[in-house]
Amino acid sequence: MSELIYYDLKQTSGMAASLSVQVAKEIGRRIVSGSFEAGSLIDDEDALAKRYQVSRVVVRDAVKILVSKGLLDVRRGIGTRVLPRDRWNMLDDDVLAWHLSAPPNRKFLEQLMDVRLAFEPKAARWAAERARPEDLIEIAAACERMAKTDNSAEDFIIADSLFHKAIIKAAQNSFLASMEGVIYSALLVSIKVTNKDPRDNGASIPFHREVYEAIAAKDAEKAELLTEKLLKDASFRLSATVNNK
């Protein structure tokens, strides 16, 4: 799964393609993939400028971008150091997207699913309590799109992502809306790890439809329980795949 799909789902083009942004993206991917270990110093400006065939000003601006995302720390007289993962801005769109280009990280996957389990069942409960008619139409449309998708795994995963996004929107909580990137990253990385076409999971579509029906019926408790079950099943299958590798 390409990180471009993530940006499409977020309805952004990713970072603009300036030279400094391109360099930041290359270095950022290396940090996220573990090529640059936490605590290590990256090359100085001159070495990076030579490697990427850009000016020192471009490198300096690229480093500033990564500092703002919590990936790097610049200390005068010491150098530019890679920060540990617990300092990264994990909700940053680029940090989440760059994980799609990196080797699977078991801890990252587990944490993604932990976060989803923590807030998505509640989002489904609140959606059942607060959804407007137009919200229900959006959830139903995403569910039907999943059922009718037969062209590619990519189309299916987009429909699946839009289903969960519509539920979060229906919960009418601005804080939850900022978490949608976690859903996209979790779904896309999961497909990459399992290397399985999500359309092969025949039970998935009717189970998503059950969640929608519970929300439409304003059965908040059932919507929450069904969503929790859906996510726990996905988490179990993902863990089994990772453990077997």
Image: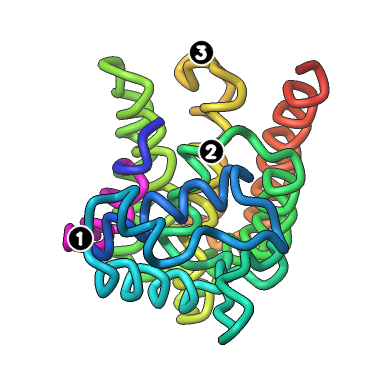
Stretch in magenta: 5-19
The amino acid type, in three-letter code, at marker 3 is: Asp
Residue under pointer 2: 102
Give the structural element (helix, strand or loop) at label 1: helix
Q: Tell me the residue at 76%/46% (across/down).
A: 107
Looking at the image, can residue 212 be seen?
Answer: no
Q: Tell me the residue at 43%/39% (across/down).
A: 160
Label 3 to label 2: alpha-carbon separation: 25 Å
11 left or right of 88?
left
Which mark, by number, is residue 79? none
Q: Tell me the residue at 71%/64% (across/down).
A: 84
Q: Tell me the residue at 38%/49% (across/down).
A: 26
The amino acid type, in three-letter code, at marker 1 is: Leu
Residue under pointer 3: 200
Instruction: Name the magenta segment's main secondary structure.
Output: loop
Decide which of tag 2 and tag 1 comes sooner along the chain: 1
